[in-house]
Amino acid sequence: MTELWDPVKVLRLPIYHNCVGWAAHDRKCAGRLNKDNVVQIEAIVQAMSQLLPHSKAVHPLLTKLALCGLCKTFHRDQHEKMIDEWGIVIRRYRAKQAAQRHSSFKQPDQESVSEMQIKPSGSSRSTPERPSPLELHVAEPFLGTIVVQGAHDVHLAEDSLSMSAVPGKYYLVLSGILMAIIVAALIGSPPQLSSLLPTSCIFKGSS
């Protein structure tokens, strides 16, 4: 069977099979145990290692261990003391093991929470979309350019002038000028643009 814990290490049993009792000045007894007791102690320790430390079956084994592990000459009367002492040691061992398990379960959760707080969520990042060439073309201001080809190429360009900014009352004037230019181009003698404008008409891009 699998060993669940090490009674020799936890209970601090003498490794050379000496008496488990206490001598004067808080020293362990150096008395050697007989071979029969050593064999029984080894069997008891093996049985205890296959039980959980808090198992009820451990207490009777502690009683047998105290009776077999104490020398008959000086420390047989310490068996009750040793049972109580081992019980305290086992409870401390259980508490320590429980604390270690709790810490091992809790630490990964804290690390994952910290990583979530430090690392920004991938869904929260948004890359601004680049406008399409069509949108860029539409967004540019309209520059009206009129090209008339005939006997002579006539170009009329309105530099940086939006057609929507021209007042409505000048549309008729502009259309008349345009018609005159087209007719003159077809005839072959384009008139001067200034001669077509009335003296009272002053063109303004916007008010």
Image (spheres, rainbow, N blue to C red):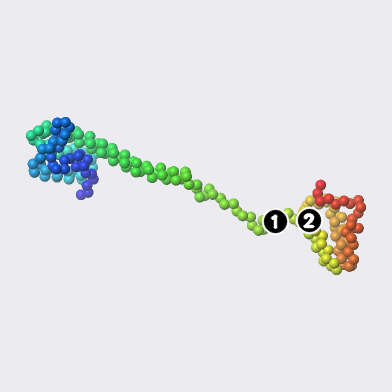
Residue 71 image offset from top left, x and y in percent: 10, 36
Q: Position of residue 66 (x, y in %)?
A: 14, 37
- Which residue is depicted at the point 69% across and 54% down? 139
Residue appearing at x 34%, y 43% in the figure: 104
Residue 41: quarter of image: top left
Q: Secondary structure at mark 2?
A: loop
Q: Residues within 10 Å of mark 2 (few under 14, many from 20)?
A: few
Q: Is residue 177 left or right of residue 22?
A: right
- Tell me which residue sits at (54%, 49%) in the image: 125
Asked if residue 164 lies left or right of residue 48, the reply is: right
Check residue 85 in the rendering and tell me which mark sits there, or answer none.
Answer: none
Q: Pick whichever, 158 or 182, lies toward us.
A: 158
Q: Which mark is residue 159?
A: 2
Q: Is residue 100 above or below residue 187?
A: above
- Please identify the quarter of the rendering in which residue 16 is found: top left
Q: Earlier in the sequence, mark 1 or mark 2?
A: 1
Whether residue 51 is visible, yes or no, is no
Check the image and report above or below for 114 versus 149. above
Give how far across and how far down residue 143 sits, in percent: 76, 56
Mark 1 crowd level (few <14, some 14–19, many ≥20, 10 Å Cα): few
**Tag 1 residue:** 138
Q: Residue at x 83, y 66 (%)?
A: 153
Name the side, left or right, on which 15 lies relative to 128.
left
Query: What's under tag 2, amino acid-wise?
Result: Asp
